[in-house]
Amino acid sequence: MVKKVTFFVVLFLLGLIPTTFAQISNIVSEVKIGNAKENEPLTLEVRFQQSALVTKAVIAYRSFGQNEYTQSEMNLQGTSAFFTISAAEVIPPNIEYYMLFTLTSGGEETYPLEFITSNNPIQITVQGISGKDKEVLIMSPEKNEKILPAEFFISISLLRASDIVNKSATKIYLDNKDITNLALFADDIIIISPENFQIQLKDGLHNLAIELYDTANVLYHSVSSQFVIINPSYALLGQSAIKYAADVRLESRNENVQTVGTWYNNVNVNVQADYKGFELTGNVYATSEEKKYLQPNNRYMISLSTDYAAVTLGDHYPKYPSLVLNGKRVRGFSGEINLGFFNIQTSLGEISRNVEGTFIQYKDSLGGNIIAVDPLKHNGNKYAEVETGTFKRSLLAVRPSFGRGENFQFGLTFLHVKDETGSIEYGTSPKENLVLGTDLMFGFDNQNILFTTQAAFSLLNKDISQGSLSDSQIDSVFGPNGLINMDPNSVKKLRDRVTGLFTVNQYVTPLNPQELPSLAAETALSVNYFDNYLKGSYIYRGDQYSSFGQSYIRTDIAGINILDRLRLFENKFFVSVGFENLQDNLQKTKRATTTFQTLNTSVSFYPRTNLPSIIVGYTRLNNTNGLSPIKDPTDSTAYLSAINDVTNRISTQLSYNFEWHYRHSVSFSFVNSARDDQSHANYDIDNSSVTVSSGTRWLDNLSSSFNISMNSSKVDTTNFDYVSLSLGANYSMMQDRLLLAGSLSPSFGDYKRTSIDASALYYLMPNLTVQFQIRYLNYDYTSSQYDAITLLPIKLKANDVIVGLTTQLSLQ
């Protein structure tokens, strides 16, 4: 009896708080990630410790076999940031990601915190499609169906289930609650009728899970689906062809940070409507954090779409070919017409608004942050020291294309981005960017054979304040006796060709377009047959390629990438291999050419039965430029440019869901990354992390989880070791009208911080909730900021308290 009690105590301690990722961070409280399933969109929500810390959030992610990250700006809303990875990018065995935050202090921080030194991203395991999914047919409710409470019933068909399945042992879970006892089993059909269903379903999203067991009572397979319950008070189904849903969220929060208290208030409204094939989507987010001297924190958007056309107004993220415009927030207009044989897409708006700089004092000459000012406005003074502002940056993009994109599509893209020189007074070097692109795709046999290619050419002007040059100015600036040794006639021809579209002066790059320094291109061919996906690609990015619509692209690089992913045993077993060979110095502007070689391997096992899932990965990165790290008397500086390092990374992930008296979920991960630097810097890095997490559902209304992460890093001769814990529980009472949650998250070692969270959510009505939250933070760490006098990192010690009240109303 003592052993049994001890076991349950241990399980409870292994159970407290929903598992996210136990990564230390000065910014991030937790990252919530949905179920990663192949070819389904994946949404990530980042919750910050304090909303006032972050002004911009960028996520960088990549699928297995890709060495280059796709970077996109996240949608900031209060204490959270959101991003959805598209279904096409969610493929087994995993997705890797990290995040970069711009802070209100002007600094930057990554998540995980040690990513800059360890280069170890966070991995999300992606579950592959299983052939067993077809053995279970959920006939009602259909996936993502919106239904009234009175019309709710469950109907499941096991007609296609294997002969080894014990159909009578099937279990049904609704929102993690076992409702099998309410089911009627009739041969291959399982039904839960409304008269047998005594649970009152709240408005909103619900999850339905089905578990099949074999004749030995061992878990054979599981499937899940989701549906939405709509409120009959607001449903017009049957009375009107309009279907709609609305959600209103009000929040008031006080943050007491380092003895300074600040109130934050925001409102978030989401609306969706459908009428005879017309879909309307709207969002408004307004916050007290909106300031004229910052980039916008408020967000608003409305979109109307049909099968053939779409219009979007407000803040949105238009998608064009990835080399030109992708992941950039645009405030303005986007529209598209899709006729199949001909399509056109256009976007017009601003990607940054004008923020005026600050006058400091008058000066006698130029230099540093001293700019020329209008003497008529400044009492005859010609120069002033200022804190420069931000110009309004306007964007225009147009892409006509031919073909539906199923078997063929050819497109042309035009992008023009320009700073408005008159939008602020105290600013320097307004810029302009012009990009011309083309893309082509061929798909055969339902895209089992797919060929894609795209290319883009860019022009960048780093200072358009003086406008285009005249003929006489070009003759004086360019030529053998000018500042730039280039044929003046070539510059004049370029200016004349782009007159009205682009400003041409001595600040234009490239000045040598014939050498293709601003060309970017990529080509890929993939073949998917016999459960084997093989893809080869080639990329080329000139060192001067620049697109203001794609700020995070890697330039001065060219090479090949090969990926092979083999599925075995009904998608239970994956073997994946990727190889990449890239080189820089395309325009021969560097002392030596660096070769970047990456080998990625992964073996994944998803039994979908009463066995753990296992993923084992190995990555090797080898970077070298051929220069000797030993000082040569004949060339005393060559060794300083030497690059010769190898990084080996080994990772293991295990996850196991099982039932022993209660439902448990356990996971384990281990990552070791070792960098051996043979250059003169000898910048070796060794990083190891171990994470163990467990979750348990004790009762229908009580669940808990536990997470422990141990991390050890050595950078050169500096060690950084810490242990992080997360413990918490969730409990519902009063017939699920009151939901309580609490957590304790301490960190020990070289990083010391304790976080205590508590919340209570109460349903005033089925569609109206009020939530109270409180967070206490005690931390003692060295920040990324430096003291201006001692030049040493600033050590922070504080006790912060955050209190918030949120009200949410759902109309469906």
Image (tube, grey):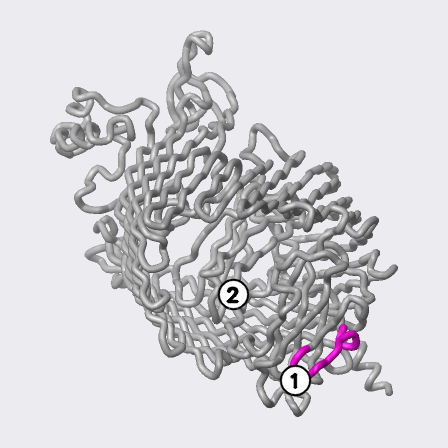
- Which residue, as the protein is rendered here, is positioned at the far bottom? 216
Q: Say whether residue 36 is magenta.
A: no
Q: Residues within 10 Å of mark 1 (few under 14, many from 20)?
A: many
How far apart in space, not on screen, are marks 1 and 2 (Cα)?
47 Å
Looking at marks 1 and 2 on the same chain, the residue that comes earlier in the sequence is marked by 1
Residue 74 visible somewhere in the drawing: yes
Q: Which mark is residue 213?
A: 1
Task: Please state the horizontal and vertical placement of residue 582, each as a whole percent of the image.
Answer: 30, 61
Q: Is residue 685 left or right of residue 150?
A: left
Q: Residue at x 51, y 28 (%)?
A: 355
SS label for mark 2: strand
Residue tagged 2: 714
Q: Which mark is residue 313?
A: none
Total number of numbered discs in the rendering: 2
Where's the N terminus, which quadrant? bottom right
Q: Residues within 10 Å of mark 2 (few under 14, many from 20)?
A: some
Q: Tell me where the magenta segment starts and ends, as one range.
A: 179-189
Q: Is residue 630 left or right of residue 601?
A: left
Quarter-wise, where is residue 485 in the image?
A: top left
Task: Please state the horizontal and vertical placement of residue 761, each as a whole percent of the image.
Answer: 79, 53
Q: Between residues 160 and 679, which one lies in front from this camera angle?
A: 160
- Which residue, as the protein is rendered here, is positioned at the far front? 239
Height in image: 796 above or below 331?
below
SS label for mark 1: strand
Height in image: 216 above or below 706?
below
Residue 583 visible somewhere in the drawing: no
